[in-house]
Amino acid sequence: GFTQPRDQLIARMLFESGARVSEVLGLTSGDWRSRDLRERAPAINKGSRGERVKEIWWSSTTSQLLRNYINDDRRWCDLEGRGLDDLPSSARLFVTDEGKAYTYKAFSWNWRNACKKTNLKVTPHQARHWFVTMALHKFESLPDDKRDAARQSLIAYMGWRNPDTI
């Protein structure tokens, strides 16, 4: 239902990483470069006071789509026409058509329109819940002695202060 590749890419990252919208929208080229442009980047977590204390992960396919977006669609929106190799470390990965940082409000508006087109009633935050649910289902197939460690890893990855959140 999205009309922009940028929004499709953000949605992929939300479902694949379990990250919050603010964590994905806050990513910079420097964040991604710090992990060798692979399938992950450090992000500012809720309550981290602006520190990049959380690392979010996504698929290799999404990494390639991100690279394509930055070197094509984003380049057209960049005021200086820069691609990935030319962006300063502080440059946001996701920008508006005018080259400004893409905001939650703008993404949320596009999300609602995409949902309306496809007759879905979901919020962006529900992608986070979906991610956790899918992880818990996968844990069921693990041997009993590995299940608790997997749950603890999920709690750490999600950045939950209270383990009871699960």
Image: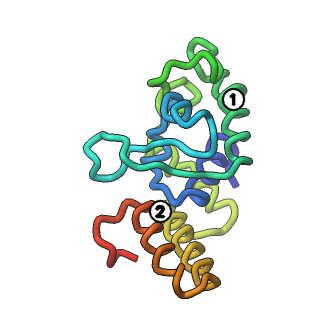
Depth order, front residue of 108/137: 137
Is residue 95 at all visible to an observer of this figure?
Answer: no
Question: Would you place residue 161 above or below residue 50 in this image?
Answer: below
Residue at left offset 51%, top offset 50%: 56
Please rate how many residues cluster around mark 1, counting C-alpha atoms within 10 Å: few if below 14, some from 14 to 19, many from 20. some
Distance of label 1 from label 2 (alpha carbons): 25 Å
| Tag 1 near tag 2, CB within 8 Å | no
Depth order, front residue of 95/129: 129
Instruction: Indicate the quadrant containing the C terminus: top left, top right, bottom left or bottom right.
Output: bottom left
The label shown at residue 73 is 1
- Give coordinates of residue 59: x percent, y percent: 67, 52
Going from the N terminus, do you reach mark 1 or mark 2 first?
1
Question: Would you place residue 117 above or below residue 164 in this image?
Answer: above
- Give coordinates of residue 144: x percent, y percent: 54, 87
Is residue 29 at all visible to an observer of this figure?
Answer: yes
Depth order, front residue of 19/137: 137
Residue at left offset 52%, top offset 60%: 18
- Give coordinates of residue 99: x percent, y percent: 54, 24
Question: Would you place residue 156 above or below residue 65 in this image?
Answer: below
Instruction: Indicate the quadrant containing the N terminus: top left, top right, bottom left or bottom right.
Output: bottom right
Residue at left offset 59%, top offset 60%: 15
Residue at left offset 66%, top offset 48%: 8
- Give coordinates of residue 51: x percent, y percent: 31, 40
In the rendered structure, which amino acid carries the disc numbered 2? His
- Mark 2 element type: loop
Q: Given the current orientation, which residue lies at the most extreme bottom position? A: 144
* Residue at image mark 2: 125
